[in-house]
Image: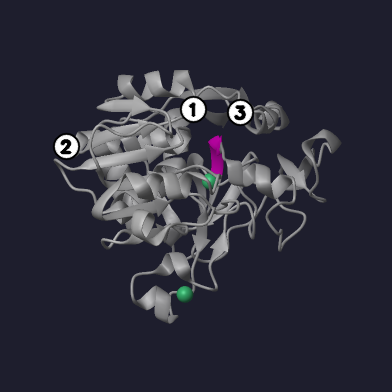
Amino acid sequence: MKGMKAWVLRKPGPLEGTPLKLERLKLPVPLPGEVLIEVAACGVCHTDLHTVEGEIATPVLPIVPGHQVVGRVVETGTATKSFKVGDRVGVAWLFGTCGECAYCRRGNENLCSEARFTGLDRNGGYAEYMVARIEFVFKIPKSFDDIHAAPLLCAGIIGYRALKASGVKAGQRLGLFGFGASAHITLQIAAHQGVEVYAFSRSDEHRRHAVALGARWAGMLDETAPAPLDGAISFAPSGAVIPAAMEKLDKGGTLALAGIYVDTIPAMNYQKHLFNEKKLRSVTAFTREDAAGLLRAASRAPVKTDIEVFSFKDAPLALKKLKESVVKGAAVLSMA
Ligand SMILES: [Zn+2]
Ligand SMILES: [Zn+2]
């Protein structure tokens, strides 16, 4: 059988040491319940950067990163009825769960201890082909082309779960702290639901972008919002944002943390930051229900994803620009 090109991580380390190498691998063979996908586009996420540089433990090496994959089914394993050859599909961070543990049974498959992740436990989308479990593959709405759909599959889904976790409903006020790939999608979905969005960012350009996408107001972290927030989401890796955001919440409000990594959180003052039933919670991975919900909501809004496209051979450059925070919108690798 023919082979494929893939970016392979054998030994994580700083980007400067070129830990990712372009290699020729054997074409993967789908097991029963899996499909082989020809990759068309793959989003580049901060988690990929943490994986490549060794800030996230890598249980499987060598590994091919990438977990925001849009492609077409080229081969179905046995007993695979839901998809046929030629179908356009998306693959996200959740490669698969056990389906049997207490978390899985109560609708929290995002917390499954046996969960496996795309691009961490199983080879991901920085490759010409990959396999995925049929039950964890999603149909991509027709209104999105391949490259614009890719960022929906991590940035979009995580933001959507965080939006639900914030508990904010139509007519209420939502604060967004940190304005990157995830926030720019979440803002559009919240605004379409009739939520008033208040964006906080250090960057002038990001604040303008937020208002252009429908935010009611945009300001700096140390500014007071025009009104208390019914809920908020922090996308920032900085723990210092947390007390500042908690202080801006109205009584009973929730702050949801969308990041996989947050540094030290400064001491909080009970009266100022938590009393009056304010809630602070994290968001960990997602469920298939979140993924389906996000894709529906993105199609309905409709969300417009801002992307910077890199050719497949420039994967290390995309990661470097992500590390330097100079990507315009969400970074996407295109196989075209
Ligand atoms: Zn991601
Ligand atoms: Zn489980």
Q: Nearer the viewer, residue 157 or 35?
A: 157
- Pointer 1 or 3: first along the chain: 1
- Mark 1 belongs to which amino acid? Arg
Query: Do the residues bearing badges 1 and 3 touch, measured as CB atoms within 8 Å?
Result: no
The residue at 68%/55% (across/down) is 56
* Rendered-image quadrant of the C terminus: top right
Task: Rate crowding at label 1 as few (under 14), some (14 to 19) or many (20 or more) other CA atoms within 10 Å.
Answer: some
In front of the other: label 1 or label 2?
1
Instruction: Specify the amino acid type for callout 2.
Output: Gly
Q: Is residue 314 visible?
A: yes
Say whether marks 3 and 2 touch (CB < 8 Å): no
Q: Which residues are magenta?
A: 38-43
State the SS at label 1: loop
Mark 3 residue's CB less than 8 Å from ligand 1? no
Which is nearer the eye, 195 or 88? Answer: 195
Q: Quadrant of residue 118?
A: bottom right
Q: Earlier in the sequence, mark 3 or mark 2?
A: 2
- The residue sitting at the left extreme is 171
Asked whether mark 1 and ligand 1 are closer than 8 Å, the reply comes as: no
**Real-space Cα distance between discs 3 and 2?**
31 Å
Q: Residue furthest right?
A: 17
Q: Which residue is mark 2?
A: 194
Q: Say if 193 sits above or below 275 in the image.
A: above
Q: Which residue is mark 3?
A: 325
To which residue does mark 1 refer? Answer: 202
Is 42 within the magenta? Answer: yes
Mark 2, other Cα within 10 Å: few <14 / some 14–19 / many ≥20: few
Does residue 163 appear to the left or right of 88 in the view shown?
A: left
Separation of disc 1 and disc 3 at Cα? 13 Å
